[in-house]
Image: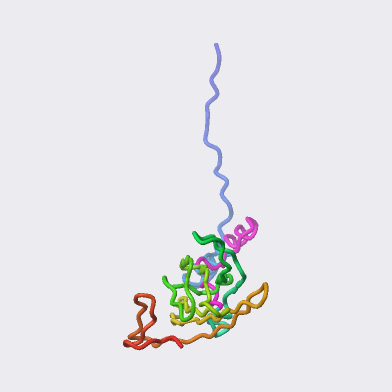
Amino acid sequence: MSHETRKTLMNEQLPAPSVVPDKPVRERVLKHLREVLTAGATMALAAGCSPFAVVDPLPPPAKCREVGSVKRALTIDATLATLQTGGGPQSVVSLTLTPVDQSGVTFSPGAHVVQGAIESETITATQVHLLLQPPAGSDTAVVQVRASCGNFEGTSDVVLTFTLTRTGTSVTVSETEDVLPDAGVAFDGGTFTDGGSDAGP
């Protein structure tokens, strides 16, 4: 016959009571929040990222606004080229305009020839490529292209006039830049107009 041991409750061991610091509730809550924020920032830095990084930074200023000129924010390439036609090869002047990085420059469709003829024309918002034929008896062609300089600060429109002259096996180019008025300006049928008057030279 076995004797079952009677089970009894053990004396409960509780920590000695402590006195709560005599601080206002608001101060205790702020202290707790500071501890939480400090711990979060430490974890973010340990993960290799900054808790104060800017999510959506402003874009850099447009180059054309920075230098105060559209033409100074472009790469201008003028060379001699050969165009194959039904009448045989023709020597023409090639003009390529390409905005530099973050230039803020965009081109408008269409070009206006002042002197000579446009044999080929490719214009997008980010590049202009023209093949120009000077008039008979001349080595100089003149053409106008419209462009805009703008970013989040605003936009301004200009007419760029390029004078290209064949000199032996190369091409010399000079350019002018005319700012268009804010209103009443249109580009229609290959002619830049301002209230009906030609804005070209």
- The image shows residue 165 at horizontal and vertical percentages of 59, 79
Image-based side of 44 in relation to 198, left or right = right
The answer to whether residue 165 is visible is yes
- The image shows residue 84 at horizontal and vertical percentages of 54, 60
**Residue occupying image coordinates x 43% and y 77%:** 112
- Residue 165, placed above or below residue 52: below
- The image shows residue 76 at horizontal and vertical percentages of 59, 74
Q: Who is closer to the viewer here, 196 or 149?
A: 196
Magenta range: 39-63
Q: Quadrant of the N terminus?
A: top right
Residue 62 located within the stretch drawn in magenta: yes
Main SS of residues in magenta: loop
- Residue 162, placed above or below residue 87: below
**Residue occupying image coordinates x 59% and y 64%:** 82
Q: Who is closer to the viewer here, 101 or 133?
A: 133
Residue 98 located within the stretch drawn in magenta: no
The answer to whether residue 147 is visible is no
**Residue occupying image coordinates x 48% and y 87%:** 178
- Dividing the picture into quadrants, the one containing residue 3 is top right
- The image shows residue 198 at horizontal and vertical percentages of 38, 86
The colouring scheme, among rainbow, by chain, secondary structure or one colour, is rainbow
**Residue occupying image coordinates x 56% and y 62%:** 89
| Residue farthest to the right, as pictured | 169
